[in-house]
Amino acid sequence: MSTSDQYIYQSGFGNHFSSEALPGALPVGQNTPQVCPYGLYAEQLSGTAFTVARSSNQRTWFYRIRPSVMHRPFEPYNKESHMVGTFDTRTTEPTPTQIRWLPFDIPNTEHVDFIDGLHTIGGAGDAALKSGLAVHIYAATASMNKRAFSSSDGDFLIVPQQGRLDITTEFGPLIVAPNEIAVIQRGMRFSVALPDGPSRGYMLEVFESHFELPDLGPIGANGLANPRDFKTPTAKYEHTNDKWHIVNKYQGELFVAAQDHSPYDVVAWHGNYAPYKYDLANFAVINSVSFDHVDPSIFTVLTCKSAHPGTAVADFVIFPPRFEVQQHTFRPPYFHRNCMSEFMGLIRGEYEAKQGGFLPGGASLHSMMTPHGPDSQTVERATKRDLLPGRVADNTQSFMFESMFQLRLTKWAIENQQRDHDYYKAWQSIPVTFNPNQI
């Protein structure tokens, strides 16, 4: 158990947690007594099918003041939505071109909350078939007011870049700052307040399976993201009779239902299907201490596995501050053509393989088998520098969403005014140093 101001967390990843805001609110010895303590109602939230193997089964029992079914019918959302759930020729376009976006604009109006500030960059597959993923950004100026959001399509991995997110969930509150992440899974209702004013960040949504820690293999039992550093909220309830709106993302479209009470009336809960946060500064970095730039998979924080062993629907990878000591080595990330798609964002600082242009709040996409690598300035510096032990990426945090899928882009992303159409020039002045007469 850890405490930060009014936020109290339980520590661990994938644990079976128990939490109660009133003593004795959790039933003893059973899940659905005829009458629950304090006159509460029992409600199960299933994150996997009932018959999934016990080792993978995820669910939580809520004990709440009102069942969540007490709402009026869902209706289509009455505002323009920039979210997509089916990535086909009607909604998106393919391009193998390397793409970079300068920092995405934050709206210049005071009334854009987290929901209305969401825009889909691209993705693959179909949310209705539970296959694929989506990449979104958010840019918001206002806290959500009496509104809750949830996705029936998949799990959200949220990466704040500017401004903290004060997230209220049915499980309790989370405060998530830049250089931290939050994972809010399918069906979980949450609201976002902006304690620092206008906020911007990135969001990965996976339509199949759930995020888990990567296998460590010969690394051993410890390293990378350690389970004890993940934090899950504790129960905190509201008992109100005011009007709320529940906004649900369903097959990529938004629907809204009204109700006359707070959705955050859970007095107690227990289970292993719960939201969590993680501080990226706690990542235990593994790196080469002899020679060569090793593959970025050693920086994987979380993975959503596919049915193909060793291949991910999506990996969340970071490039954290660390020592670099490799000898006789071109130390920046190598030139690459990948059988995976690579979407990168920058939380702060300057990415080690790009000298300018790739800025905090911006992004890049290197599509499947499209060449990419360090820019001209980085190449020149890396081939001439003294290979002394040193630090890399201090005061910097970049990340990558890597996927087995080929991503299609939304019209909003392709035509966005922040798209850097000169990105290709980053590589055009790489010198040709080949000399057939000299080894």
Image: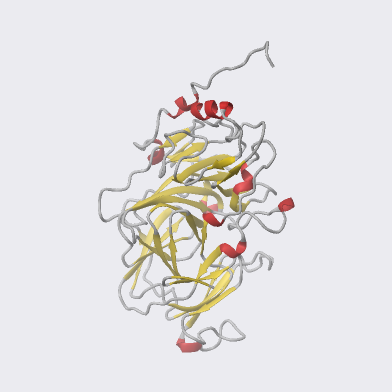
Looking at the picture, tell me which residue is in the foreground, 89 or 41: 41
The reply, left or right, for residue 158 in relation to residue 370 is left
Hey, which residue is sitting farthest right in the picture? 218
The part of the image, by quadrant, that contains residue 386 is top right
Q: How is the rendered protein coloured?
A: secondary structure
The part of the image, by quadrant, that contains residue 360 is top left
Number of on-image labels = 0
Q: Residue 367's spot in the image, x, y percent?
A: 54, 36
Up/down of 248 relative to 120, above or below:
below
Hey, which residue is sitting farthest top in the picture? 437
Up/down of 36 relative to 59, above or below:
below
Q: Residue 249's spot in the image, x, y percent?
A: 43, 57
Q: Which quarter shows the C terminus? A: top right
Looking at the picture, tell me which residue is in the foreground, 143 or 177: 177
The part of the image, by quadrant, that contains residue 170 is bottom left
For image coordinates 40% across by 60% down, the residue present is 165
The reply, left or right, for residue 241 in relation to residue 357 is left
For image coordinates 64% across by 37% down, the residue present is 293
Q: Residue 412's spot in the image, x, y percent?
A: 38, 41
Q: Which quarter shows the N terminus? A: bottom right
Looking at the picture, tell me which residue is in the foreground, 191 or 219: 219
Q: Residue 415's spot in the image, x, y percent?
A: 37, 36
Up/down of 408 relative to 146, above or below:
above
Q: Is residue 135 visible?
A: yes
Q: Is residue 404 visible?
A: no
For image coordinates 58% across by 49% down, the residue present is 315
Up/down of 318 relative to 164, above or below:
above
